[in-house]
């Protein structure tokens, strides 16, 4: 990390989310100047309100780009492109993009970042382990039954702590520019197997039920989930989870020189917090 970069603030977009929060904590712990990019931050940032972009980019040298709701959403490449253009014009020299593994639509946003003129690193991440404890799958786990439109397709679940460690390295260290890191865990698990590991870690009976994409979409709509979110989730659970990601990546090893965290370690550590309750 150069002295010039040490004096510049790092902007973490999605700085209160699963990966962004962890990145902020690590940077603050290392006394690296960091700014949270969030609608609830003191200086708010909103992807949908371009008036909020320039203020958070002031005196920023590097940016962690986490797009909401997902790079597969319509209009993502255009929005990411407009932001990166403004970022580079504002003096940003390094961009680290959180991308989705197996999401063909995300490639357009990757290309935008790669052609921005700044140093870039792409983090292509598989399904987050923390979706079971910090996102929409928490409630079903607590309810004792996870219902999803996915069958025996294995997924190399990745831990958000590993993503954060790689992101911090790419934001603060040299040697990661121009790298595309495929971030996965160390083994493949089906969703049913992942739920079974959570069940074992908690000592609770938690079942898994496969349903059709149509039934899943109808159930989400029935509880008031917005149509665009229903469409995105259905896409992720069907198109992306069609087996294209059923192999391991070496991004964590290449970036950090260590093995990624196993899902069993995530399940045991999370169960110990009590977030999933007890039998």
Image: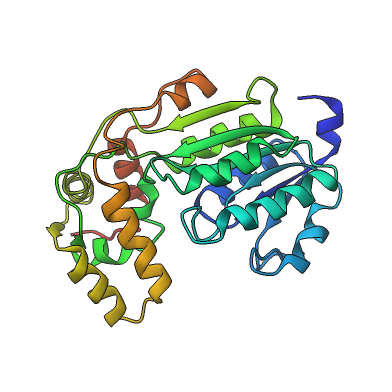
Q: Is residue 137 visible?
A: no
Residue occupying image coordinates x 41% and y 40%? 101
Instruction: Identify the coloring.
Output: rainbow
Q: How many numbered dots are placed on residues in this image?
A: 0
* Side of 113 relative to 254 (left or right): right
Say which quadrant the C terminus sits in.
Answer: bottom left
The location of residue 53, given as percent across then percent down, is 76, 60
Q: Nearer the viewer, residue 192 or 115?
A: 115
Front-lying residue, 89 or 162:
89
From the top left corner, tell me how far across and down residue 249 is, in percent.
38, 27
Q: Which quadrant is the N terminus positioned in?
A: top right
212 relative to 98, above or below: below
Relative to residue 260, is residue 237 drawn left or right?
A: left
Residue 158, image quadrant? top left
Q: Residue at x 23, y 75 (%)?
A: 219
Q: Quadrant of residue 38?
A: bottom right
29 lies left or right of 219: right
Q: Nearer the viewer, residue 107 or 68?
A: 107
Left or right, residue 155 beside residue 6? left
The answer, for residue 194, to whether it is visible in the render is: yes
Above/below status of 108 relative to 174: below
- In front: 187, or 123? 123
Q: What percent of the width, then of the height, locates residue 150?
A: 20, 53
Residue plotted at (34% across, 41% down): 266
């Amino acid at each position: 990390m150069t002295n010039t970069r040490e004096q510049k603030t790092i902007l973490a977009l999605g700085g209160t989310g699963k990966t962004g929060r962890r990145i902020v904590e690590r940077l603050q712990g290392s006394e690296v100047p960091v700014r949270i990019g969030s609608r609830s931050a003191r200086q708010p940032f909103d992807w949908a309100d371009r008036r909020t972009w320039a203020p958070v980019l002031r005196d920023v040298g590097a940016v962690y780009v986490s797009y909401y709701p997902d790079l597969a959403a319509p209009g993502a490449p255009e929005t990411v492109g407009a932001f990166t253009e403004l970022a580079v014009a504002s003096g940003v020299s390094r961009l680290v993009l959180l991308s989705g593994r197996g999401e063909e639509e995300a490639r357009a946003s990757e290309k935008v970042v790669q052609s921005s003129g700044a140093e870039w690193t792409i983090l292509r991440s598989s399904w987050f382990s923390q979706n079971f404890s910090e996102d929409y799958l928490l409630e079903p786990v607590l309810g004792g039954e996870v219902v999803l439109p996915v069958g025996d397709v294995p997924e190399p679940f990745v831990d958000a702590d590993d993503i954060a460690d790689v992101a911090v390295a790419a934001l603060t260290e040299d040697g990661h520019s121009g790298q595309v890191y495929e971030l996965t865990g160390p083994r493949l698990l089906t969703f049913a197997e992942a739920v079974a590991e959570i069940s074992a870690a908690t000592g609770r009976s938690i079942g898994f039920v496969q349903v059709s994409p149509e039934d899943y979409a109808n159930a989400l709509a029935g509880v008031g989930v917005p149509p665009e979110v229903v469409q995105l989730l259905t896409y992720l659970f069907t198109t992306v989870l069609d087996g294209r990601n059923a192999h391991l990546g070496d991004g964590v090893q290449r970036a950090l020189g260590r093995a990624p965290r196993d899902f069993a370690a995530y399940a045991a550590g999370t169960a110990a917090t009590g977030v999933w309750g007890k039998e």
